[in-house]
Structure formats: C-alpha cells, structure tokens
Image: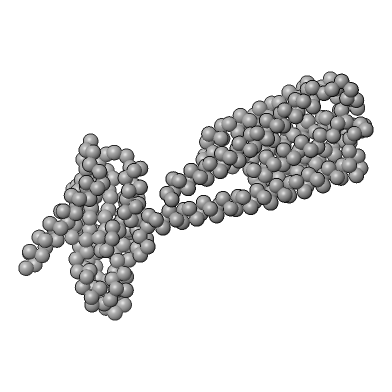
Amino acid sequence: MSGGTAAHHDLTHRHALERVALWTRVCVMVMVGAVVLGAPGDVRWTTAWQPALWQVSTVIALQLAVAMALAVFRLRHAESGRYRWVAAAQTVLDVLAVASPMLVVESVAGVPVWPTAVLALLSAATRHTLTGVLISWVVVSAALVAGVVLGDGGPDSPHGAGVVLAVVVLLVTAATAGVQANSLDRYVTELHGARLAMTRQARTDPLTGLANRAALQEYESAAEPGQLTVVLLDLDGFKQVNDVYGHHAGDLLLITVADRLRARMRADDLLLRLGGDEFAVVLPGAAAEDAATAAETWARAVAEPVDVGGGVARVGVSVGVACRPPGDDATLADLLRVADRRMYEHKHDKRRTAA
C-alpha cells in the first residue's frame, strides 16, 4: 500500500470525526431552538431572566454558527498543520454552546436539560479523546450546578441528589466516550504506522535500504515533466568478491557502496538498487554533462577498497548516462534502456582496453 493511500485513509478518518462533530452541533442547535426559543406556554419561569432570552439565545446561536463554520472549513482542509488548534477551538465552542443553554434553561425555566450535555461530551471525545472530554465534563457540570444555584428551582429541576446523579451520569458518559476515543485513536495510529512500514518495505531494498524498482515507478507517477537524467552504475569484479570471500562479503560490499553513493547525493536525487550489483541514480533537472561529472566522483568512491572481514576487496564501476532534455516526453523506462545500453558499451570498452 502506498504512502499516498495511507495518508488518504488517515484523512478519511479525520473527515469521519468531523462529520460526527458536525451532526452533533446540528442536534444541539435543534434542541436549543426547541427548548429556548420555542418554550411551551405552561413553562414556569423561575427568574427575571425571561426578557433576556433573545439576547442569550443570539449569543448561543453565534457560538454554534462559528463552530459549524470552522467545522466546514476544516472538513475540507483536515490535513492542515493548524488542524489541532482549530479542533481545540471547536471543542471549546461546542462545550459553551451546550453549557450556555443549560445554564439559562435550568435557571430560567426550571427545565432539566442536562442530558443534552452528552452531545458536547461526544464531540469533545472525537477531537481530544479522554483529556478533552474530561475537561468538557468539568465545564458542563459547573454550568449545571450554576444553573440550579442561580434559579430558585422549578419542581423538575435536579436538586441535591438530582444534581449529583446528573454529574455522575455525565462523568460515566465522559469516561466511556473518552476511553473509547483513546482506543480508536491508538488503533488508527498503529494502523497508519503499519501501513507506512508496509509501504517502506515494499519500496525499499532490504539489504542496502535504498529505493527499489517499485519506488522508481512511484517516483515517475509523481514527477513533473522536464529535464531529467538517469545514471546506471554496474559494479565490475563483484562476482570475484563473492567467489573469493563469500556472499557475506559481497553483501557487505554492496552495503558499503550504497552508503558511499548515498553520502554523495543531492537532496532531490533518487538513488536505487535495481538488483544484484546494479545501481541507478535519477537526477531531476541535471544535464548529461553534469551527470557525467558526478558519475566520475561516484566511480572513484566505489573504487576505494572495502574491508570485507576476511580481506580487502576492490571493485570498479561501469557507467551509462541517459538524459531527457526539456520538452521531451521520454519515460524513465526509455531512459533506463538507453543508459543500460551505454553502460554495457562502457563495460565492453574497458574489457577491450584491458585485453
């Protein structure tokens, strides 16, 4: 599974959490509208706050509107680095949007609406797991107690044991939602880590840690068109190292060569082991002359002696270079074929010269 696919799944998870919080706000708005703005005529108002209901309701509506606006914005940009800060702001607004009508309705109308606080707790759990939901529970419980204290207590308002029961029920709900959210968050994190590990394993050579052919295909699919140079490097004398010192020495030689080449790459170069003793370097934006100069430096580094445990091994390198000029539509496969042919020509020329 590619890194892009793993990132897509992580983004989908965040979108799902955003939708949960968004619909939670919708439910809160409906309940607030039904209870505060459309209170039945037989409700017994217990304080002199009734004339201020419209002002208080407006503040609550503004809180919810801002929270929902942020939700829609972040739903489209959940991959942003500011997501955590905006999520914290949304959690605060969600809690205030529930705590405010609780305070008003409990103290003004004597109507117990504390069960609506469960929605705020669930919203907090989707964002900040156990810590966030417990903080939200503290705020909601304080609003519940304040609503009872400020009002003179309608017959249906929870007093004494009723307040304790409400706080305990909300605490159990908060703890349950928080623990479940923690478990889900940990599961998603572990799953995302496993996907990344599988992606790295699929596109990495297990011996040298370099990229492999799968990584090359992924690179080409994401690369922008333009000037590009491919350099192939094939080790000379590698088979003799295996024959004389053993395959363990050959593996150690390959690892050393990979480290030497890696240390001489630019930040945006792609170094690969294509298989056996063959390496490739993709140089975006490099001309053939620059690549040839760099290849000479790499060849000198590869030719340095390598301690393979039972002795010192030396290998040479044959090089093939293929360049795609600006405006050309040659693929990486095309460049590899050209570089491969030139690499074998270079190897053949060296053998003929040595003979």
Task: Please state, as top left, top right, bottom left or bottom right, where the C terminus lies in the image.
Answer: bottom left
Q: Which of 21 and 96 is in front in this view?
A: 21
Q: Is residue 321 visible?
A: no
Residue 190 picture location, percent across and down = 55, 55
Q: Nearer the viewer, residue 185 or 40?
A: 40
The quadrant holding residue 265 is bottom left
Q: Which residue lies furthest to the bottom in this view?
A: 310
Colouring chosen for the image of the structure: one colour
Q: In this view, does 47 lie to the left or right of 57?
A: right
The quadrant holding residue 93 is top right
The quadrant holding residue 140 is top right
Residue 50 picture location, percent across and down = 85, 22
Going 90% across and 25% down the picture, which residue do you hit? Answer: 44
Going 58% across and 40% down the picture, which residue do you hit? Answer: 16
Question: In the picture shown, does residue 47 fall above or below 212?
Answer: above
Residue 280 picture location, percent across and down = 26, 55
Going 23% across and 36% down the picture, which residue do you hit? Answer: 327
